[in-house]
Image: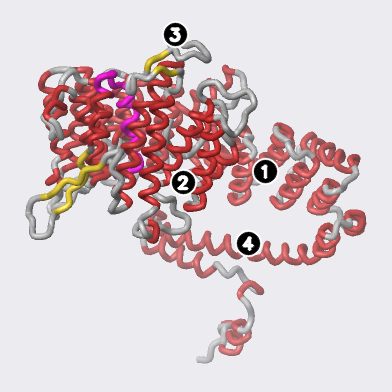
Amino acid sequence: MSSDKSTVSPWDKETSQKFESKRPGEYFDPCQEAATRSLKCLARNGGDRDMCTDYFQAYRDCKKQWIEQRKEEKKKAGDRQDVPIWSAIEAGNFKQALKLVDKRLAKKRTSHLEAFKIYIRSRSSVQSEKDAVLAHLEDLVIKKAIITDQEDIDLYDDALVNAIPEAGSIWARTIGELRWQSVKAYPKQEDSGLKSFKACLSERDWEHAQQIASSLEKTFPNKHQYVFWNISSLFLRSMSSDLPIEKRTLWGRLAFGQISKLATATIQADKSKSLPTRAIHTPQELLLLQRITAAHGKLEDQLNYLNEPSLGPESIVAKGDWELWRNKLQLMEASEHWQQLFEITGDLLKRARMKDERGEIVEARMADWAVWQAYLRSALALRTPSTLDSVSNEIAAHLNPASGIDKTWRRNASLAWLEFTFKNSSTPFATETSGSDLEKHPRVAAIIKYLQDFGDATTAYSDLRLYVELLQTDERSRLLEVLRSGLQFGKTAKINDLEPELKALSISKNEFENANDMTRCVNLHKLTYLIMSSLPEHERRSSPLRKAGELSFTCTHCSSPCEVYCGVCLEQVSQNSIAAYTSAIDDNGKISKSLLPTDRHPADDFCTLAAMCLMKLSISGSSDADGSLKSKHVAYALQAAVFLEYGWSQSKSNSDFSLLLSSGPSQEPEKDVQRLPLPSCQ
């Protein structure tokens, strides 16, 4: 039986070829295939949408891309019409640009052309045209105009900046309000909301930024980032100085309340599943929790959160963020939980030297200086024999050459030894000394030991300066004797000799085999200057016995009568520095040839130190009335200038030399040197 003509399928080969020659967008929504797949997935899974999330997302992405493509095509058509206007603007012919816009407005009035016209008027040099910009914007705000296209709002934004460069609060009440009204009218336009949110943040318009963030959070409840953008915006409003204290407190409490709920949700979350949307997901969010709690909660709340396995520094969410450990240690110290702090920091330091199954230390960062400081403070607060012994043993374990700890982290242990030696009444443990009588001066011995281990670091002087300042006069004298007689550095083995040999350096021995030797010697000279000149000068300057223009003091080191500056000691330091610098530079290129043009020569600080001593000599005592070249003071100043000129010729990349040369000798040379980036001298 032949079938009826009406039942014949219209989709035959001929029809198929006809439609395949067309673009999908010409006759149907190109995303229908994705929609069909979504429905089939639902049918297969009994209507369970969770099982078909990827299919539905593919459909949404396809739809979004298609709509954006159609918008882009329309925009390009409009852009082509804008080309002549932009050409006139770029040529500075604003009158012509306005004529072109008015011509198009006469045909059809659009919000884009209105924004374009205001932008052109803002570029005019006529003040009345610029004044019209703010009036137009305020009129839009009064009318609660809704501008859908973000590019039109951008034109208004640029117009306001052109008319009023420092808009400030004017921006918030005009452009900020327009952006918020646009988002409020079309909350599902996510990209527009994001753009407006970022624009408000960049202009410090916290009110509208928070309103937009709140809208995004409500419209897209499954997007985690908008939850925290809203909380962050609330917190920013609580810190705004433009608001009264009552409102700031209100916004702060709202932020604290919301983030506390997220913290509770994180604690209560099922550990076998991924975290819910309204929970804490990242280390940055944990830090925000701590900051908001610090501002609007209690110290106990902060510690409770940090002690929680889900929110603490070792939680999965923290991802090893070190700042959380710092916060925890600081809070425990502030709350004086000394015993608990001592146990936690002790455990961290043990972990910092433990090796894994491959023999590698993987948690070396646990020996951070902040951990050592908290460890020492808690031990000194408890001050029991067992805690002090534990500190001694822990430091010794970190300094053990066989420990495998990197030198960077051993430096922290050496600094801890220094700190402990200076703050504890007795030596923490026996040390290797270069002289038996040093055992009478454990603090001096600790400084020397640190110099021997880390004297080749440019930071050694900065590390030791504070401790040298704490020394008593007899301790300073003993340290100065060691620096003068020589200090043993580094270990170098002889050929066919199993016994290591220590190399001695002093402030008078100028034999450098490498750049490390120069750096070590630079640190010796800086410490010598600190002991002989800088510290005594500070004490004399603050002494009630000081009388201007009189030799009111006797130098502790050379026994010469002096004013604030001791000329004898300054001359000695400058001569030693010049001799060391001359020897370091005259190395036949052994060291300097390995330096890049942008590198500073390791001996540059010798030059800086000598020049500063000479500048001090140039202003010490009374000068000749005629200021002639015979004056010693003028001679010293010229010597300093010549020496700096020579140093600069050898090390052009060292800006310290050019700075000192251009500033000249002032009445307070220490301040000149303090402006330099290196902690060289004072």
Residue to which mark 2 is pinned: 222
Residues in magenta, as a range:
456-476
Count neighbours of disc 4 (C-alpha within 10 A) and say few if under 14, some if 14 to 19, many if 20 or more: few
Tell me the element at label 3.
loop
Count neighbours of disc 1 (C-alpha within 10 A) and say few if under 14, some if 14 to 19, many if 20 or more: few
Q: Identify the residue shown where x is 76% and y is 63%.
A: 79
Residue to which mark 3 is pinned: 545
Q: Amino acid at mark 1?
A: Ala
Q: Which of 574/98 is in front?
A: 574
Q: Position of residue 470 (x, y in %)?
A: 31, 21
Residue to which mark 4 is pinned: 68
Residue to which mark 1 is pinned: 185
Q: Identify the residue shown where x is 89% and y is 57%.
A: 93
Query: Would you say 30 lies left or right of 127 here?
Result: left
Figure check: 227 above or below 542: below
Figure check: 475 above or below 56: above
Q: Mark 3 near mark 2, Cβ–Cβ under 8 Å?
A: no
Q: Amino acid at mark 2?
A: Asn
Q: Amino acid at mark 3?
A: Leu
